[in-house]
Amino acid sequence: MGAPRWSRVVLKLSGEAFAGGQGYGIDGATLKMLAAEIVEARQNRGVDIAVVVGGGNIWRGQIGAGAGMDRAQADHMGMLATVINGLGLQDVLEQMGQPTRVQSAVHMAQIAEPYIRRRAIRHLEKGRVVILAGGLGSPFFTTDTPAALRAAEIEAEAVLKGTHSGVDGVYTADPKVDPTATKLDQVTYMDVLNRGLKVMDPTSITFCMDNNLPIVVFDVTVPGNLRRVLDGDGGVGTLVG
């Protein structure tokens, strides 16, 4: 095997990816599979990995807002859900012998470090996986935005958006609704914005475009896919750049 095409990446995992087939909460077998993918990429391929975790398997702020809850309060609840997922991922990674650090944008010193850019970079340089939880620490943002922002801050070379439920890339339309939808192997940032393609939220797409950060959208629940993306297998996922 040659060198991976990126030496440092941010892996964005939605909360729903932690739920597996049950659709909510944390599925132990799924969590172990995701952790094994990360360990293989870190220990066998030598890639620095920071993981930004979502919390939709536990709570989504937009659902609370839709039920009449104050949106800022609901989003803060969602940030706490991401910390739960981050701690769960840390536990399984360390059971597999992979050193980790959880950093949170919401300060909770008993269980996680505060997010500090230089400290995060130092952890990566020492071979640790850094799990970034708590979103941005501010309401009204999805976890796509901190994935893009943290990638720029820690000098990552790409954002890897891990999907689930059989979604293996970016399509011309929703393949679950439109049987004529076709998968795109590569697409530009402007095409994503202009065509309203479901990749990441528009704020994060624009940020990645402005900072020349490529995005790969791929199905993270298929064993080996993370390694294939890092090795440049063009048949896996969609490259946005």
Image (spheres, rainbow, N blue to C red):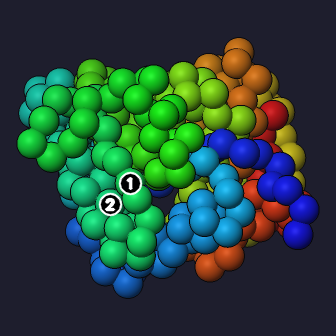
Instruction: Tell me which residue sits at (83%, 49%) in the image.
Output: 5
Q: Nearer the viewer, residue 192 or 20?
A: 20
Q: Please tell me the numbered disc located at residue 32.
A: none
The answer to whether residue 146 is above or below residue 127 is above
Q: Nearer the viewer, residue 10 or 16?
A: 10
Q: Quadrant of the C terminus?
A: top right
Q: Residues within 10 Å of mark 1 (few under 14, many from 20)?
A: some
Q: Is residue 12 visible?
A: no
- Left or right position of 137 against 116: left
Which circle, 2 or 1, is nearer the viewer? 1
List x then y, in percent, for residue 118.
45, 23
Q: Is residue 150 visible?
A: yes
- Left or right position of 108 against 20: left
The residue identified by callout 2 is 90
Q: Quadrant of residue 25?
A: bottom left
Q: Callout 2: helix, strand or loop?
A: helix
Instruction: Tell me which residue sits at (88%, 69%) in the image.
Output: 1
The residue identified by callout 1 is 100
Q: Residues within 10 Å of mark 2 (few under 14, many from 20)?
A: many
Label 1 amino acid?
Answer: Thr
List x then y, in percent, for residue 203.
54, 22
The answer to whether residue 219 is above or below residue 102 is below
Instruction: Tell me which residue sits at (56%, 40%) in the image.
Output: 125
List x then y, in percent, for residue 81.
21, 49
Q: Nearer the viewer, residue 18 or 190?
A: 18
Question: Label 2, label 1: how many angstroms apart (C-alpha)?
Answer: 6 Å
Residue at the front extreme?
126
List x then y, in percent, for residue 216.
71, 48
- Residues marked 2 and 1 touching at CB (< 8 Å): yes
